[in-house]
Image (tube, coloured by chain):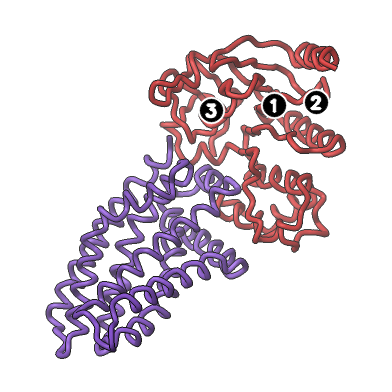
Chain colours: A purple, B red
Amino acid sequence: MFARTAWLVFRKDVTVEVRSRETIATTLFFALSAVLVFAFALVKEGRVVADAAAGILWIAIAFSATLALGRTFERERYGDTLRALMLAPADRPAIYVGKLAGVFALVVAAEMALVPLVAFLFGAALLQRPVLLTGLLLAGTLGFLAVGTLFAAMLARARSRDVLLPVLLYPVTIPVIIAGVRGTVALASPVPDEAMALFWLTLLLFFDVVFVTLALWTFEPLMTD
Amino acid sequence: MIDFDQVTLTGVGRHYGRRRALHDISFAVRAGEVVALVGPNGAGKSTLLSILSTLVTPTSGQVRYGSHTAASAGAPLRRSIGWLGHDLQLYPELTARENLLFFAELSGVATPGTAVDGALASADLGDRADDLVSSFSRGMRQRLALERALLHDPRLVLLDEPFTGLDRTSTGRLASRLGDLAGQGRLVILATHDVLLPTDLIATAVSLRDGRLAGTQSGRVWATALRAGAQGER
């Protein structure tokens, strides 16, 4: 029943997004705009600050994921459907997993456009080890969104939610961003350091386990007032 | 699913920081009754409905659903509660059928397809089943939302200002449906201040003022007094 509930919520979110295309459009536009701004600021006469690409990639992911989280729960708040979800006689942690999966799919879709753009604009060899890079991106995105989904759901009914979400989210997820950046730097160097990238990937997976477990544990008490 | 014939509130209170939203509320609702929570804006009606729905925990006192409490019963108790809020809790990007099917499956309804067909017929929306909810009028959405709240056959039905924004025809239709629910032995609790309600719908009116119980009276007495007051203001 747990997996079924999570699947129902995920399928509903995907259907709504496919019909409105609202969140993916704003997330993608924001992510690409951020990368372009960094490109204008940091690329001079074809030369880039060393290791800038990895940092910019993860900053763009963090900012656009925050936007996606806000939009996803704004939609649930608008018609008070979040209350209907919480009142449904279903496992509340499963509802959290469904929402997490929905926003995860959205951000991963944005990353598929973001990575080639950053590689092109900053001349970064991001795709030398595509499997490891994919692992870093998936694990980092999951860790970031595991906390983000919990906070966005908690703040959905708060008046100053747009301000509070990044204020609460970024300090907690700094370890994820640092691990993602360091792992990506290791992969994008002229001679890819696979061992270092694997170390950061393992650390990211550890963060994922911790954050997802804590979120599953705290979602129900935090959502009931 | 947990069955019960009575909901009893004993000394229920709720604080938000230093603000006291509800204080020492006690009354009971029996099966087959429609009880109205009445009072001005900010009286605590919605907070009390949220407590009854189990989404908000009282800071003092307790609510008993038969012999159960929200803390002891959890998800099975939620299966016995239907909620219709002022915001109608529907996804405008989904069709009427998709909305109902989603909530039916989420609620673990045994035969969701059959339940949804029945709900669409009850809402008189069979011919608009595959239209997006965003294209519906307020009255149509209200009918659909009520059926969404009833899909899992709840024992306790909670409604927050269900008549707001409805024309006279839709109001009469909703009142008739609520009367039917009470006739089926369900417990119906609604927050309202509507003067157009049929006088025989409400069994008991529970008046709240500043979060306190201001009194209870029969629905007929309350509605008559409300209408007399409304006419006096004209």
Location of mark 1 (residue): B192
Q: Tell me which chain the residue with mark 1 is part of.
A: B
Residue B149 at what x, y percent from top left? Answer: 65, 43
Residue B5 at what x, y percent from top left? Answer: 61, 25
Mark 3 is surrounded, within 10 Å at the Cα level, by few (under 14), some (14 to 19) or many (20 or more) other residues, namely: many
Residues at marks 1 and 3 touching, judged by CB atoms closer than 8 Å: no
Which amino acid type is marked by label 3?
A: Thr
Q: Would residue A130 be seen by someone viewing this image from the given angle?
A: no
- Near-viewer residue (A183 or B75): A183
- Near-viewer residue (B129 or A89): B129
Q: Tell me which chain the residue with mark 3 is part of.
A: B
Circles 1 and 3 on the same subunit: yes
The answer to whether A183 is drawn above or below residue A221 in the figure is below
In the image, what residue occupies the spot 35% across and 69% down? A61
The answer to whether A71 is drawn above or below residue B19 in the figure is below
- The quarter of the image holding the C terminus of chain B is top right
Which amino acid type is marked by label 1?
A: Thr
Q: Is residue A224 left or right of residue B196?
A: left
The dot on residue A47 is none
- The quarter of the image holding the N terminus of chain B is top right
Q: CA distance from mark 1 to mark 2?
A: 9 Å
> Does dot 2 land on a helix, a strand or a loop?
loop
The answer to whether B77 is drawn above or below residue A79 in the figure is above
Q: CA distance from mark 2 to mark 3?
A: 23 Å
Of mark 1 and mark 3, the one earlier in the sequence is 3
Of mark 1 and mark 2, the one earlier in the sequence is 1
Mark 2 is surrounded, within 10 Å at the Cα level, by few (under 14), some (14 to 19) or many (20 or more) other residues, namely: some
> Does dot 3 land on a helix, a strand or a loop?
helix
Q: Would residue B103 be seen by someone viewing this image from the given angle?
A: yes
